[in-house]
Image (cartoon, grey):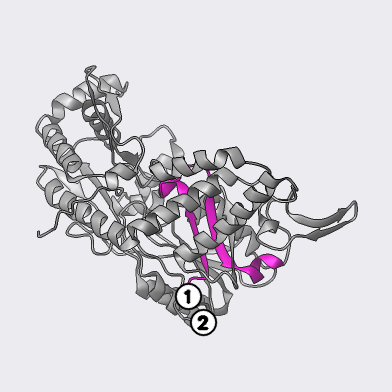
Amino acid sequence: MNFVKYKTNFRNLVVGVNTKIPLINGSYVTAINFDNAATTPPFVSVLQEIIRFAPWYSSIHRGTGYKSQFSSNLYEQSRDVIARFVKADPKKNTVIFVKNTTEAINKLAYRFCEEGKKKVVLSTCMEHHSNDLPWRDKYKVDYIDIDECGRLSMEDLERKLRKYKDSIALVAVTGASNVTGYRNPIHKIAALVHQYHGKILVDGAQLIPHVPFDMKPDGSPEHIDFLVFSAHKMYAPFGIGVLIGPKSVFEQGVPADVGGGTIEIVTHDFIRWAEPPHKEEAGSPNIIGVVALAAAVRMLESIGMENVERYERSLTDYALCRIRTVPGLRLYGNKEDCQDRVAIIPFNIEGMPHDILAAILSYEAGIAVRNGCFCAQPYVQRLLNIPGEEVKKRIQDPKMDHPGMVRISFGIYNHYDEINVLVQMLHKIAAHRDDYLLKYKKILNRA
């Protein structure tokens, strides 16, 4: 495989990349974090922005003090920063701040429920639980199928659009899988969904931090109606997320969470709700999280999302090339290249339980990975070809070990040399598998 190594100084932009951690033998090494799909460390600039803002911190909205006015203005201006980053039209769309992507989808599921009207939500077989479970108690949910590599079937999407026609409330699809890293053709999906007079939600948690994103104008067939994502996956892990959608959707009805900040006037027998987005942001706003997210967005813009995408693609290509040399290692999804994926690679080593492999990488080499089903159990079950009868056994016996994989995921601060350390360790594990199994079954109290 041909790939290009890019020389960058991205590593200097991120906090904690040179932290030393202990190994099981008592020695110390520089930590290697390959679990960026779960959460990323903060940008240096994000922490600096929080420190600069801290003396001005005060209550948001309604306060008359100078600091309160300053904080409130900064909070509101950050909505424009976010809208610009994803090319959302601020005149027609509203930017709602939430805790994370999961809360955003739950909020939308509540808000989008139209009594007596459209009752079907199309999710997919590759979704994170957060883009599946919130819909189940409010709609009939059907799942767009995947192929043998775990890629979304556009043919099945169109079949289901034809089947349900005007009953479809929403098509809820991930922008990129948190398991395989596959990038769905979201604008092609949007155009097809709009042909059938539906709307589309893109779960952007795994997509927004890695590639340029464009919601497209409202009049475009490729327009993304709703977008959600989390700051903690884009170098601002301070408890904030985003829900973007048409103002009109949030103007009517009662918000999912009610209380302070959501109303215009209240008596004991009357409520007039505030206009969105404030109507949807109950309680004291997380101004520190918003400051952090806006700072992270500005840093990503200064780097250039095209540069982020190019560098992470190079890392992924390099890792795929090197990791395939490990005896007994099995890759899932696209095993050849990363043209249709973000920087995520799932794998297993034959005869090595995924949890033990992850522990060995951490204890022996200081490499942080994620293992298990990554909050996407139906998808992982399909990728692993787990028979239905075996799934039923696990339902009946919660003590049975769950199947799973090991996942590595890169950020812009990761480096080729870190991948070399990983591959060297995987070769060592594969060569001495039985010894490692015996040792770590005892350490982890595995029978």
* Quarter holding residue 22: top left
For residue 220, side relative to residue 406 (left or right): right
* Quarter holding residue 182: bottom left
Query: Closest to the observer: 383 or 265?
Result: 265
Query: Closest to the observer: 435 or 407?
Result: 407
Question: Is residue 446 rendered magenta in the image?
Answer: no
Using the image, determine if residue 272 lies above or below residue 324.
below
Secondary element type, mark 2 = loop
Question: Is residue 233 rendered magenta in the image?
Answer: yes
10 Å crowding of disc 1: few (<14), some (14-19), many (20+): many
> Does the image show residue 333?
no
Image quadrant where one finds the C terminus: top left
At 41% across and 46% down in the image, what residue appears?
235
The residue positioned farthest toward the front in the image shown: 66
Amino acid type at mark 1: His
Question: What residue span does the magenta drawing correspond to?
Answer: 224-251
Q: Which residue is mark 2?
A: 219
Residue 173 image point, x, y percent: 44, 63
Amino acid type at mark 2: Gly
As measured in the structure, the alpha-carbon distance from the residue carrying label 1 to the one carrying label 2 is 7 Å
Image quadrant where one finds the N terminus: bottom left
At 25% across and 20% down in the image, what residue appears?
24
* Image marks 1 and 2: residues in contact by CB distance under 8 Å: yes
At 69% across and 46% down in the image, what residue appears?
66
10 Å crowding of disc 2: few (<14), some (14-19), many (20+): few
Q: Which residue is mark 1?
A: 223
* Quarter holding residue 326: top left
Query: Closest to the observer: 218 or 430?
Result: 218
Residue 199 image point, x, y percent: 53, 73
Residue 314 image point, x, y percent: 20, 56
> Does the image show residue 293?
yes
